[in-house]
Amino acid sequence: MAQNIYDNADFFAGYSRLPRQVHGLDGAPEWPAIRKMLPPLRGKRVADMGCGFGWASRWMREQGAASVLGVDLSRNMIARAEADTTDAAIRYRVADLETLELPQAAFDLVYSALTFHYIKDFSRLVRMIHSGLVEGGDLVFTIEHPTFMAAAHPHWIADEDGRKTWPVNGYSVEGERRTDWFVKGVLKYHRTMATTLNTLIGAGFALHRVDEFAPTRAQIEAMPELAQELERPMMLLVSARKSGT
Amino acid sequence: MAQNIYDNADFFAGYSRLPRQVHGLDGAPEWPAIRKMLPPLRGKRVADMGCGFGWASRWMREQGAASVLGVDLSRNMIARAEADTTDAAIRYRVADLETLELPQAAFDLVYSALTFHYIKDFSRLVRMIHSGLVEGGDLVFTIEHPTFMAAAHPHWIADEDGRKTWPVNGYSVEGERRTDWFVKGVLKYHRTMATTLNTLIGAGFALHRVDEFAPTRAQIEAMPELAQELERPMMLLVSARKSGT
């Protein structure tokens, strides 16, 4: 199963204080870019994979989604999501995406934010999602960018001009990456851009849009430290559609 | 127009000694990966954009292509391509891809190797190629990878373990990049992965396969210096199909 770091007390305490957990979706600078990639939500049956505290699940209902199933590996996260939700059309479930099975053709949209890089078997996951979507259904997800994840020591360095620079090595060597984030040894899985996109295409998805989060000028003015995200691609955003096969 | 570095005598002298120019397609380590992305060639009308000495143009005819149009900005390259070709079904033309117009629906395959990163207006080029292809026609091309091209000082560095590491900065800042390659100030245009792929999708192409060249174990055994290409993605290979619209 996937490493359940979110039920580690130290990790959970740190993670819960992140702006995006305190302030919800508006605390995530990539959220405006994600919104643009989402299809119209009215009447849609949505699965939110790695739903965390349920911020996106609740937002999608507010936008008119017919129902939302929020799934997360962490009992801590699901308990908090349930405590924060009063809407019978949103259900939460503790489950491991490595083994989860969705009912066939039961969803119009599968959404996932910053979760799939924790999953070892991406190919199985994508085929399962494809099976769970109706024809024409959408998969919209974000992951840490492979350029961001690849290096053995992923931290800022300076180039000869002192410019913030991101190191890349081991890009084509896929597999485990361990980093320290609130706790030591958080386990993620690096895949190349090519593997990510070809896995989707191979499962029967048509790629609809690919994005690499970069802050807007207005975002940088409001939060100057975001400027560094122009230097490196930190997140990959993908919108894909289940095409008729 | 695009910078015509290939008609600079110093550049041309250096470039002509590259293994891939001396030995042809088999001198390019990414060639086996490109071959896998190409559709069957028998009977196809092919345009080879940035054909250089015509190695790929001639190979495609040997594979049964009905005709090949090789286009290059460099008079030097086209002169050599014509001298090396004795096949009336291969025509060569000196032209700038920034302004070239292909006849509508006249080609089954447009192929291009390591040329499009010299082009400023990629969007115009892609729409023109789309118009030049028949329905169901293929576009297969390679470019320098955006992760490879982005940095202000694109050269190997070492991480704290001494491992070969590639620097990335300015990734989201698209536009001119000047590098020294045989001569000073070779002009290329950096675009993000997202821009490259979304431009194709927006023009009406369905993405068929994306690859990031990485050497195979056998290639590294035959040429140990290729091992460094596991550390960084150096080339992006894309196969896309003109879908019915």
Image (cartoon, coloured by chain):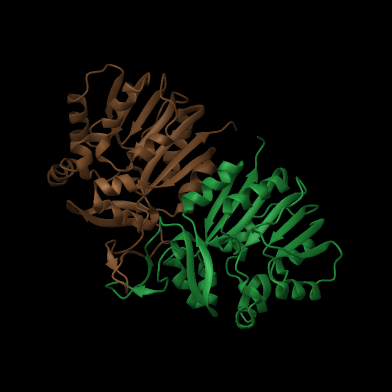
Chain colours: A green, B brown
For residue B84, above or below residue A46: above
Q: Is residue B73 visible?
A: no
Q: Residue B56: horizontal and vertical position, in percent?
A: 30, 31
Left or right? Give the position of A39 relative to A182. Answer: right
Q: Nearer the viewer, residue A99 or A183?
A: A99
Q: Residue A144: horizontal and vertical position, in percent?
A: 52, 63
Q: How many marks?
A: 0
For residue B126, above or below residue A195: above
Q: Nearer the viewer, residue A36 or B45?
A: B45
Q: Which quarter of the rendering shows the N terminus of chain B?
A: top left
For residue B91, above or below residue B245: above
Q: Which quarter of the rendering shows the C terminus of chain B?
A: top right
Residue at 56 percent of width and 58 percent of height: A120
Which residue is most to the right? A88
Q: Nearer the viewer, residue B209 or A103?
A: A103
Residue at 49 percent of width and 63 percent of height: A176
Left or right? Give the position of A138 relative to B189. Answer: right
Left or right? Give the position of A106 relative to A199. Answer: right
Q: Is residue A181 visible?
A: yes
Which residue is most to the top? B88
Residue at 58 percent of width and 69 percent of height: A29
Quarter of image, res A172: bottom left
Q: Residue A100: horizontal and vertical position, in percent?
A: 70, 56
Q: Residue B153: horizontal and vertical position, in percent?
A: 28, 64
Residue at 47 percent of width and 32 percent of height: B138
